[in-house]
Image (cartoon, rainbow, N blue to C red):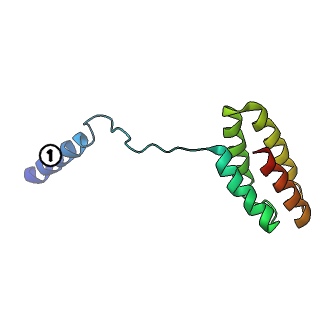
C-alpha cells in the first residue's frame, strides 16, 4: 500500500512540473488582411447569388476587422453587409456582392 501511495505521489508531482518551462514563443506569423478575406467571400456571393446564412457572423467579423484599419471603408462595408444579409433574390444578392467588391 505504501508503494502504491508513493508511486501516485511521485506521478502527481511529475505531472505537476510538466509545462513549467515558461511561455512558448509563436514562431508562425500570419499576415491577415480582412479586405482580401472579404473579397474572397463577396466573389463567391457575386458568382452564386446564394443567400447569406450562417456565414453572416463571419462576414460581420471581417467587416469589423476592416473597420480597425480603415474606419470609413469598414463602416460602409458593414452597412452593405447588413443589406446583403436581408436580400432573398439571387440577382439582388449578386448585385449587392458586386457593389461590396467595388468598395474593397
- Left or right: residue 81 compared with residue 16: right
Instruction: Give the percent coordinates (x, y) of residue 35.
Output: 68, 45
Q: Which of the image's four quarters has the N terminus?
A: bottom left
Q: Is residue 85 visible?
A: no
Q: Is residue 40 visible?
A: yes
Q: Which of the image's four quarters has the C terminus?
A: top right
Q: Is 73 drawn above or below residue 62 in the view shown?
A: above
Instruction: Give the percent coordinates (x, y) of residue 74.
Output: 75, 37
Dot 1: few (<14), some (14–19), or many (≥20) neighbours within 10 Å?
few
**Residue at 66%, 39% in the rendered image:** 65
Secondary structure found at label 1: helix
- Left or right: residue 69 compared with residue 77: left
| Total numbered badges shown on the rendered structure | 1
Q: Residue furthest left?
A: 3
- Left or right: residue 82 compared with residue 2: right
User: Which residue is nearer to you in this view: 5 or 22?
Assistant: 22
**Residue at 85%, 61% in the rendered image:** 94
Q: Residue furthest front?
A: 102
Instruction: Give the percent coordinates (x, y) of residue 98.
Output: 82, 55
Residue that numbered label 1 is attached to: 10
Q: Is 102 drawn above or below residue 25 in the view shown?
A: below
User: Which residue is nearer to you in this view: 76 or 101?
Assistant: 101
Instruction: Give the percent coordinates (x, y) of residue 95.
Output: 88, 58
**Residue at 75%, 53% in the rendered image:** 56
Amino acid at each position: 500500500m505504501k508503494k502504491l501511495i508513493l508511486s501516485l505521489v511521485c506521478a502527481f508531482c511529475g505531472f505537476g512540473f510538466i509545462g513549467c518551462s515558461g511561455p512558448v514563443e509563436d514562431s508562425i506569423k500570419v499576415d491577415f488582411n480582412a479586405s482580401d478575406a472579404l473579397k474572397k467571400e463577396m466573389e463567391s456571393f457575386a458568382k452564386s447569388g446564394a443567400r447569406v446564412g450562417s456565414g453572416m457572423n463571419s462576414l460581420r467579423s471581417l467587416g469589423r476587422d476592416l473597420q480597425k484599419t480603415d474606419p470609413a471603408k469598414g463602416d460602409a462595408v458593414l452597412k452593405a453587409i447588413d443589406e446583403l444579409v436581408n436580400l432573398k433574390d439571387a440577382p439582388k444578392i449578386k448585385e449587392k456582392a458586386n457593389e461590396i467588391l467595388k468598395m474593397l
